[in-house]
Image (cartoon, rainbow, N blue to C red):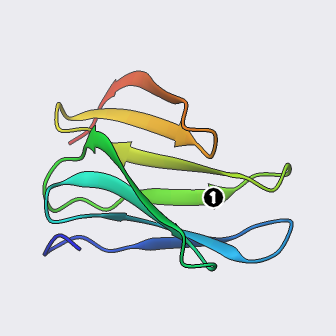
Amino acid sequence: MDPGSSPSITPLSGGGYAEAFQNPQHDLCNRLETVTQACTSLAITAGTSPSIAGTADGGYTEAYQASTGILWNRNAAGTAATTGLGMM
């Protein structure tokens, strides 16, 4: 994990949990309770912490501050989208 950042964890409606975190390369990563881990090529602002919430369909949505300072979200299917909102 990137120093200064914290992981976020959420229960999944179908059971288990998912974690979101920032790796040392400042990429968005996630891990399931099954120890399945994946890192994206989505850059996060160094030292910030992503948030994750379970969804009714058993998936999850992550929210994070991109390296550009803009708020983004990404779902369990891997679809990422910007909100266009700047963060401080």
Horizontally, is 43 left or right of 24 in the view?
right
How many numbered discs sit on the rendered protein?
A: 1
Q: Taking 87 as reference, is 13 left or right? A: right
Going by the picture, which residue comes out furthest to the top? 84
**Of helix, strand and loop, which one carries label 1?**
strand
The quadrant where residue 79 appears: top right
Q: Which residue is mark 1?
A: 53
**Residue 37 shown left or right of residue 54 in the figure:** left
Residue closer to the observer: 65 or 77? 77
Horizontal side of 1 relative to 79 (left or right) equals left
Residue 43: which quarter of the image?
top left
Amino acid type of the residue tagged 1 in the rendering: Ala
Q: Quadrant of the N terminus?
A: bottom left
Residue 27 lies, in percent from the top left, at 25, 51
The residue sitting at 73% across, 52% down in the picture is: 59
Q: Relative to 23, does residue 63 appear above or below in the rendering?
A: above
Residue 46, image x, y percentages: 13, 55
Q: Residues within 10 Å of mark 1 (few under 14, many from 20)?
A: some
Where in the figure is residue 53, as x and y percent of width and height? 63, 58
Q: Is residue 12 above or below residue 39?
A: below
Residue that appears at 26% across and 38% down? 66
Pick the quarter of the image with the C terminus: top left
Seen in the picture, residue 36 relative to 71 is either above or below; the reply is below
- Residue at 62% x, 79% y: name it: 33
